[in-house]
Structure formats: C-alpha cells, structure tokens
Amino acid sequence: MTDSIQLSIILTTHAKSNHFNSLLSDALKFNGNQFEVIVINDAVDVVNSRFIEREVNQSGNDRVFLYEHPEPKGRGLSLNEALVHASGSLVWAPLRADRLNESLLNEAIRRFKADPAAFWVLDYNLPGSALEWVHAAEEGDLPDDSCLVWNRNIIKAEDFYFNPFLDHLHGAELAFRLMKENVWYKTDPFFVVADDQSNHAGFLDIKEFLYTSLRLSETDEERAGILQELANSDEKANNKVSDDEYLLQARHLLNQGDANKSLELINKFLKRNPGHKEGVRIKISSLEKLRRHVEAAELKHLLNKRPELEQQGQLPIEEEKSEIEKERKSQKTKLSVVIPTTGHGKPLLEEALLKLEEAVDAETTELIVIDNASIDDTFDYVEQLKKNSFLNAKVITNRANRGFAASVNQGIEAASGDFILVMHNDVLLQKSSVDVLKKGFSISNKTALVAPLLNKTNVAAQKREPAEDKSHVFTGRADSCCFMIKKEIPVRFDEEYRLCFFEMDDFCRQLTEQNLEIMVVRDTVVEHRRGGTTQIMGVNLNPELKWRNRGRFYRKWNTKRERVIPKNGSHPERFQKLGAPDNPMDPDSEWVETVQKYLTNEVRTEILRGKWSEEELLTIVLTLLIADERELLRTLEDRMENITPDSSLLILFIHYYFKKNIYSRCKHYMDLAGEDHPVFDLYKLKIYTADKEFDKAVPLLNDLLEQYPSCPELFYLAGEMYKKSDDHGEAKSFFAMANQLDPYRFQTEDSAFDIKI
C-alpha cells in the first residue's frame, strides 16, 4: 500500500487554527490513493484536539495518521517526527493553503516526478548569498513552509531535517541549507498563495539563520561578514533571550501602550511556556487594547477552565456529556431562564438579574446567558456569576453575534427545566411574574406560549390599556422581550432572520399553524426598557435590516398581496391601491414588472403632463423610486422643489442614490432632512468616508459612537477610514469588531480571531 503513496502531507497544530482546520478538512476530502496525511497534535487545547479527533474519525481514511503530544515540543521537532513516519517520496508541510485544488496538486505531482529536484518553491524567488538570506528573513521576504515541496529521494537522509530551534521558517532554513548542493525549481502553486504567506523572523530565528550561514560559508570574507552580523544581533538582543526577559519586556511594552509588540513577544514566550498564567493575562490585556475582545474572552475562558480540566483529566466527550447530564438531573431544575446579550449589554443585564433573582426560586432555577460576542466586560461578569453559582448559571459564549433567534435556540437546547422563560436583557420582572406565567399553562392544554402585559409594546393584546376584567386573552402573536414556553415545545426559531426583526412573528406563526395557543396573562406587568440593546447597537440606523426580514416573513408564509394595478382611477390612485412591496429597498421582481408594464409611453406622457397635488405627486414619485424608473423619476423630482417629503421617503431617496454612488443627490435630500433622523448622519459618514474627507468623518464618527457604542456599521466605517489611510493593522481590528457584532453583513478574515496559547 505504501508504495503507491506519492505525497506525504504533514500538518502540525502550529498553524493558525482556522488555516489548520481548513487544511485538515480539505486534505481529508482527497479521493486519490497517492496521498497520506500525517497529523501532529502538539498539545493544543481540548477544543481543537476534539475537532482533530472528530475530523479524523469521520473521514474513515486509512491513510490518515494522528500523533499526539502530552507536552508541546515545537514545530521543528514535530516535523522531524512526522518525517520518520512519512512514506511518500514527496513531502509537503503547509501552514496554510487557500483554495487548495486537488486536480492541480495531482498535476504538480506528475510534473515533479517527470523532472525531479531536491525541492520546488511555489511562486517565490529565493535569495542568493548567505547574507541576502538573513536580510530576507528579517524583512519577511522568505516563503513559509506552505510554498515548499521536498523530494526525499534526492535529498540525502542526513540533510533532511528541520531546525528544532526555530520559531518560524523551518522550510526556508532547510532550503537555505540544500540549495547550493542540489537542484531546485520555482514552479506554479496548486493553491492560492496569500499576500501574507511569508513570515517575519524573530531575533532568535535570525541567529539560527546566521549560524546556518556560518556553517555554509566558504570564504573568510563571508565568515567575517556573518560574524559581524552575529555580533550586531547579540547587541540588538540586549539579553532578551531568556523567557523572563520576554515576559518583562512584553509587560513593559504593554504599559507603554505598544500592544502590537507586546503581543508579538508574549506569543513567543507562550510558545515555550504554554498556559503560563501571567503570560496569558498579558496576552489578554494586549488583545483587549487592540479591541480583539472575542479572542481575549476565549483566552480568559481557557485560563479559568484550565484547573478544572487538569483536575478532571480532560474527560472524553461522551464521558463529559454523561457528567453534565448527571449534574443536571441532580439539580432538579424546574425553570430555565434564557437571556441573550451582546454589545455593551452588561449594565442592562445586571439590573435584569437583580429583579429576576427576586422572582424565582434560586434552588430550582437555572440561568442560561448567551453572550453574543459582547465587547464590554460582560464575559468577566457572567463568568463570575457562574463561579458564584448565581441561579446555577450556565454561560454560552459565541465568537460572533448570532442574533436573537439562534441564541434562544441555543438556550432552549441547553435548558434542563420543565419551563423556559426567555427574556431580553433590558426586561425587569415583578416578583409575581414567573408564578403568574406558569399558571397560564394550566388554563388550557393547547397553550404553547404564555406572555405578560408590558409597559411598552406594539402587540395590542399585551398593552395595559384598556383595562379588562379577563385574567387572560388569546392572541396570534406576542412580543419577544419576555415569554414562557415548555421544554418539550416542538418549534424552534428560524435563524435565517439573523440578528433581529420578525423572528418572533415567525415563531408565533409556527405555533398557530400547529393549532397551538398563545396566551397573554393580565395579572402581571413586566417593564421593558424597549430598545435598550438595539439602541446601543444602532439597529435603527439601518432600516434595510427590518425591511429584509419583513420581506422574508411574507415570502415564507405566502402572504404577499396580488400584484395587480386597478384599471380605474387616476394614476396615483392606482399606485396607491397597488401598494408598496414588502421590502421597498429590495422589491420583488413581480412588483417591479407590474409597474414597468403599466408605464407605457402613453402613461408616462400622462404622468409628465398631469397636474398633481402634493400627495399625488409623492405617491407617484415613491412608486417610480422603488421601481428604479430613473429617467421619469428625475423629471418629477424637479417638481418637488417646494415639497419636503417625510423622513421615510427621504431615507429611501438617500439609500437609492447612495447605491448608485450619486452623492450629490444624497446630499440634496440630507439637506432637506436636516436633523430629523440619525440615519441621515450615518449616510453623511458613509459619503465622507468614501470621499476621504476624514476631517469631517472622524468627529461625526466619534459623535455617533457615543450614541451607538456597539454599532457594527460604525466600526466597519472606522476600518474603511484606516484602510484608505493605509493603516491596515488598525483597519483589520475594526473590521473584526464589525464582524464580531454582525457577522452576516460584515465579513472579515478569520485570522482576526485566531487564538494561540
């Protein structure tokens, strides 16, 4: 069997987790018999270890070999161990390979067999002299291990090893040693070589390159130059080689405000001292200064979890599930309270929990907090709740904001109580609220959801006024801010609604479609500080979010109106009877086609020549705007000179012209709007950013962030400003924050969240 293997793919867990996971998944999907995959788990955390085991076990591939280290040995020693087990004539040890293509890899193997060389370099130019290699290592101009493929049939056995004393560039250093005595070729890659494929070497790596240079040097002149470089390197190091000095310098840099350099040093320290508590704390502080709060939060979790894992011996998954189940049963939980939170939600959550504690039995209640990538100190707060066993707290931490629907589903699945109370983090219960809601289920066996009266709501059945003598009423929908269900409920939230809006309408519709009842009990009133979280997140700055979900709701439940324009009446009357589409910012094609078919040349002429009242003109303009009838629309806009449309129409106009990059028309309508709606300020900021008017953009951004400190769109625009100013490091940090708060609209590279202890 081993004779047929042409390529040994070596994967070690020193690659960034997202790149390693992608490589492992891609390699395990290869269909050919000429590949083997050797995986070295160099003592990574339990989460990543389980991922590796699951992927390997599910693959069913008998050419996958997993070796695990109880203590970390480093990449160099791990690679050398893998070489001992490798049976392929070619060896590839990548750290990342974007869009890895199996067919291109097969073609490369055929090419390598036809024209054998000691190694092949994928899309990189190697330096010439020894000192050029050293300088290239210093400047990050050498390829990482992903861009090198080795031919063990050509390389002498005594020369084919990786330097165990390096942190980076193991393959480059091996190529440096081999290139003078062996033939090598530059060739096309079989994956996308990313811009950041190269690595910057630390001063310890540079010294190793210098030692290699010294061993390979052939003239006294070369040796003298290398010795001088070594002396300079020692002087630069300034006794920073020891681990203690790494730690001290990282702390010093952090105190001086240089979080980037502090993070770079502490990562090197932690590579030699994985799990070192003080080192991890410095890394957490550095990450938080760089606004990489999700990564910092996960490190905190690992730091807090470590003693427990060590004591338990890191239970296998099935055993751990069993232990959790035993723990749940022993608690005899009757009520589970599910509360999602995100952004700067801690102050709201604290007040909500104070009231909750007064309304429940602490012995039989469990609190489940879903932390949707909060960017304040919510993580520390809920971990402290868990540590103090406050209401038997459980915490689910999401790396990015999954939204209300997905969070509640997570809470329902994790709940062990017979009843589940779902709350927003800005809800204050009365002492009697929980008992009153529970009693509601005893009134009818068809009741699936019970909700209270609310101080603020759009749901008529839950309004305190007018007062009624009835103790309860049945309704078709309920507010999402506070409601109770039973654990066995057969319905889950539709997660396609993303962050918010219409997910509760959909949930209620699912219940009523199954002939289940929604009840409002009128014996308790819950205070909802409506919009507490959504206001901080600036959800009202983007009406498109609500329109999108509204359109999806109506499509899903087939409640769209028939798209027909009446044959009688004036043109404005006909448009009014047609009505607007479910999502005016992204109208359905049937609605647009209906309007376009109606707008014959004759109708267009009549509209242009007609004398319309203000209301009639605005009705026509709105229809043309949504249907994107630009030519006719523009003519009629000139007639609106003495008319100020309401804010909803102004928003549609600004949105329409912004998408077309016609900023002059955007500004025209923003001038008409004045200070009427914060959406206009957001569009001003977008235009200033697009035009690089940073002197206007920056103060406006700061003002908006004061009002909406968790708004993902503002973080994204901050990233755009830094990107346009060529500060890509800061840009990446802000893009990561936008992605963290809203991963659906703002995509970013996963590398912003890589965690490596």
Image: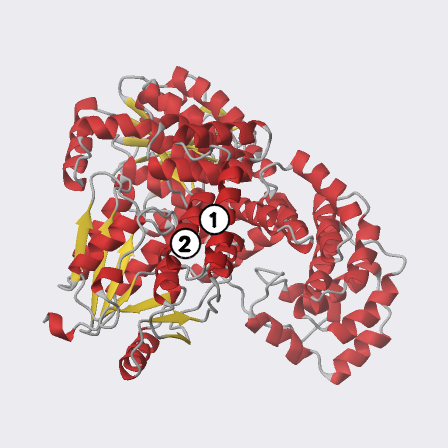
Instruction: Point out residue 379 in the picture as x, y percentages from the top left corner.
Output: 43, 30
Instruction: Say which residue appears at 51% left-offset and 60% top-offset.
Output: 132
What element does badge 1 sit on? helix
Nearer to me, 39 or 143: 143
Three-letter code, disc 2: Leu
Could you tell me if residue 510 is visible in this image?
Answer: yes
* Displayed quadrant of residue 122: bottom left
Instruction: Say which residue appears at 75% left-offset and 52% top-offset.
Output: 688
Instruction: Point out residue 229 in the picture as x, y percentages from the top left corner.
Output: 51, 48
Q: How is the image coloured?
A: secondary structure
450 in relation to 630, above or below: above
Q: Left or right of 628: which side holds 498?
A: left
Q: Residues within 10 Å of mark 1 (few under 14, many from 20)?
A: some
Three-letter code, disc 1: Leu
Question: Hey, which residue is sitting farthest front in the picture?
Answer: 220
Q: Label 1: which residue?
A: 227
Q: Earlier in the sequence, mark 2 or mark 1?
A: 2
Q: Quadrant of the N terminus?
A: bottom left
* Displayed quadrant of residue 80: bottom left
355 in relation to 499, above or below: above
What element does badge 2 sit on? helix
Q: Residues within 10 Å of mark 2 (few under 14, many from 20)?
A: many
Instruction: Say which residue appears at 56% left-offset and 51% top-offset.
Output: 546
Could you tell me if residue 466 is visible in this image?
Answer: no
Q: Quadrant of the C terminus?
A: top left
Give the Cα separation between the discs numbered 2 and 1.
Answer: 8 Å
Q: Label 2: which residue?
A: 214
Whether the residues at callouts 2 and 1 have beta carbons within 8 Å, the answer is yes
